[in-house]
Amino acid sequence: MICLLRWTAFLWTVNSIPGTLGMAVTERADDTCPPLSVEEERFSEVLDRPLQITGFDLTEKFLLRKGTVSEDLPSFRLGSSPLIKPTKSIFPNGLPSEYSFVTILRVRRTTKKDRWYLWQIFDLSGGTQVSVVVDGGKKAVEFSAQGQLKNPLRYTFKSRDLHALFDRQWHKLSISVQSNIVSIYMDCKLIERRLTDERDGIDPSGRTLITTRVEDGRPVDVEVRQILIYCDPYMAEMENCCELLEPKCETTRTFNGTSPPLVTAQLPQMLSQPPKQSIDRCHCPAEKGDSGEVGLQGDPGHKV
């Protein structure tokens, strides 16, 4: 009887280890997040186990593109018609409380001083529930949400490192949204993070839009390659920027999308670290530099 009790206690301990030491990156208690098909070469070598990715492809939801996110992403010039849909058609079961917003875009000359919604969810009365605003006049990015008391929460990121977003070149802009932290990345470099108040969930009975001017609701002249929302706040950190580089980089295949990994204490510590310099996460061949100047002539030698 004693041996049976010890064996039962051992099995209970083994089964409880995954929940104690880590959690699945994409594990959710509900069915909010559907599977998301993306190329595994998009991610840096943060994990060495297969990753099951869930989330929403807004590029596909707004009928800009259909199918899997491929390595060679086509670009779409927007601005000819409004891009707005019922929220239930984009997020049928709502939006998770923690997620990553990732987009590749190029601001055009006619738009670089505009203030516009890159993404917005609003309720039936027109109130913002969550949004990402690009402000060309201030060269800033704003993240807004709704507090638990229905109070507006707004966090403005205006680091000088964001000024390059308006240079009319392709850039990757990512935002990691955690329960009490919002972090912004540009071109795979952590720019800034802010502590936040607790946020309320969204009401899916409203509408969702992308690339729309704040002032008058008109579509914005901007180019986009993708707009993704991962149901995991760490994906913003894990993505690399190989698709922005020329020539294209050869990346190590890290994830095969078959099962979720366990995350030890290393991953949650990512967003507790101070901003650091950008890291080359691609295995890119180094280019040979120019020849240096001819050195000075040495002193004459001595006869032996």
Image (tube, rainbow, N blue to C red):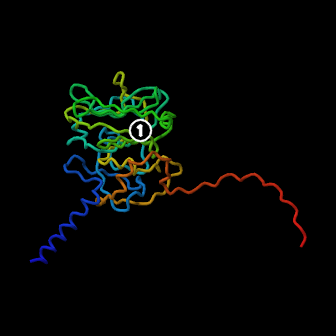
When asked about the image quadrant of residue 23, the answer is bottom left
User: Which residue is at 46% across, 44% downward?
Assistant: 187
Determine the residue located farthest toward the front in the rendered image: 2
Q: State the residue lying farthest toward the top.
A: 216
Looking at the image, which is closer to me, 167 or 80? 167
Q: Which of 197 and 249 is in front in this view?
A: 197
Left or right of 26: which side holds 138? right
The disc labelled 1 sits on which kind of residue?
Val
Q: Is residue 58 above or below residue 37?
A: above
Which quadrant is the N terminus positioned in? Answer: bottom left
Given residues 219 and 56, the one toward you in this image is 56
151 relative to 243, above or below: above
279 or 119: nearer the eye? 279
- Residue behind mark 1: 224
Image point (31%, 38%), residue name: 62
- Answer left or right for 167 relative to 125: right
Percent coordinates x, y for residue 197 in the rendering: 29, 36
Residue 61 lies, in percent from the top left, at: 29, 40
How many numbered marks, from 0 up? 1
The x and y percentages for residue 115 are: 41, 26
Q: What element carries label 1?
A: strand
**Quadrant of residue 229 within the rendered picture:** top left
